[in-house]
């Protein structure tokens, strides 16, 4: 879940682990991301029951149509844009098409928040590598370069 508390933790860990490892340009990208994320967290948006793990591995496609979604082990009350985070791995047209079909609460910044959530995962992966989570710093940095 992305909230002020988790945002503060990420900000501290970026300072602790990444500030001396990244280029000046990378740090500027992160600063911009953190500002946009902070503004987003201060904005008003609906909170609903979300899946929190909608990625390609949990989406079943049959005959080029959505046939189902599996793995409901992380549900919570949160920003519905978080469920679109994993969809950002796909082409923009696909994400926009899913959004058009989405019947839940929408707002003007919904897809922008989804993309910020998508970018956030690269930062969590990099700092998480220093906290003993699975994955390596190099994998997280590769994700960072792709998403930022």
Image (spheres, rainbow, N blue to C red):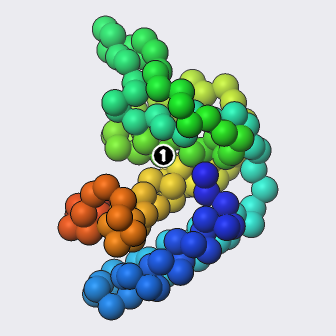
User: Relative to 111, is 124 above or below?
Assistant: below
User: In the figure, residue 26 lies in which quadrant?
Assistant: bottom left
User: Relative to 128, is 19 above or below?
Assistant: below
User: In the figure, residue 133 lies in which quadrant?
Assistant: bottom left
Q: Is residue 144 visible?
A: no
Q: Which residue is drawn at 46% across and 61% down?
A: 120
Question: Could you tell me residue 103's position as x and y percent?
Answer: 67, 25
Question: Could you tell me residue 24's position as x and y percent?
Answer: 33, 90
Q: Please indicate whether residue 108 sits to the left or right of residue 90 in the image.
A: right
Question: Could you tell me residue 137's position as x and y percent?
Answer: 26, 69
Q: Please indicate whether residue 25 sits to the left or right of residue 2 in the image.
A: left
User: Relative to 24, is 122 above or below?
Assistant: above
Q: Can residue 88 be seen in this view?
A: yes
Question: Could you tell me residue 42's position as x and y percent?
Answer: 74, 66
Q: Which residue is drawn at 76% across and 44% down?
A: 46
Q: Which residue is drawn at 33% across and 10% down?
A: 62
Residue that label 1 marks: 85
Q: Nearer the viewer, residue 86 or 106?
A: 86
From the image, which quarter does the C terminus lie in?
A: bottom left
Query: Around disc 1, counting alpha carbons within 10 Å, would you say few (fewer than 14), some (14 to 19), or many (20 or more)?
Result: many
Residue at the far top: name it: 63
Q: Residue at x 43, y 42 (%)?
A: 86
């Amino acid at each position: 879940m992305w909230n002020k508390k988790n945002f503060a933790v990420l900000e501290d860990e970026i300072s602790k682990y990444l500030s001396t490892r990244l280029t000046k340009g990378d740090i500027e990208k992160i600063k911009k991301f953190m500002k946009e994320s902070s503004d987003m967290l201060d904005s008003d948006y609906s909170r609903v029951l979300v899946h929190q793990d909608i990625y390609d591995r949990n989406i079943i496609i049959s005959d080029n149509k959505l046939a189902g979604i599996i793995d409901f082990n992380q549900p919570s009350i949160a920003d519905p844009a978080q469920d679109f985070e994993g969809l950002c791995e796909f082409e923009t047209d696909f994400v926009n098409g899913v959004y058009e079909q989405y019947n839940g609460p929408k707002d003007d910044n919904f897809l922008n928040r989804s993309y910020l959530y998508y970018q956030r995962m690269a930062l969590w992966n990099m700092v998480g590598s220093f906290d003993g989570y699975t994955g390596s710093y190099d994998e997280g940095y590769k994700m960072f370069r792709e998403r930022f």
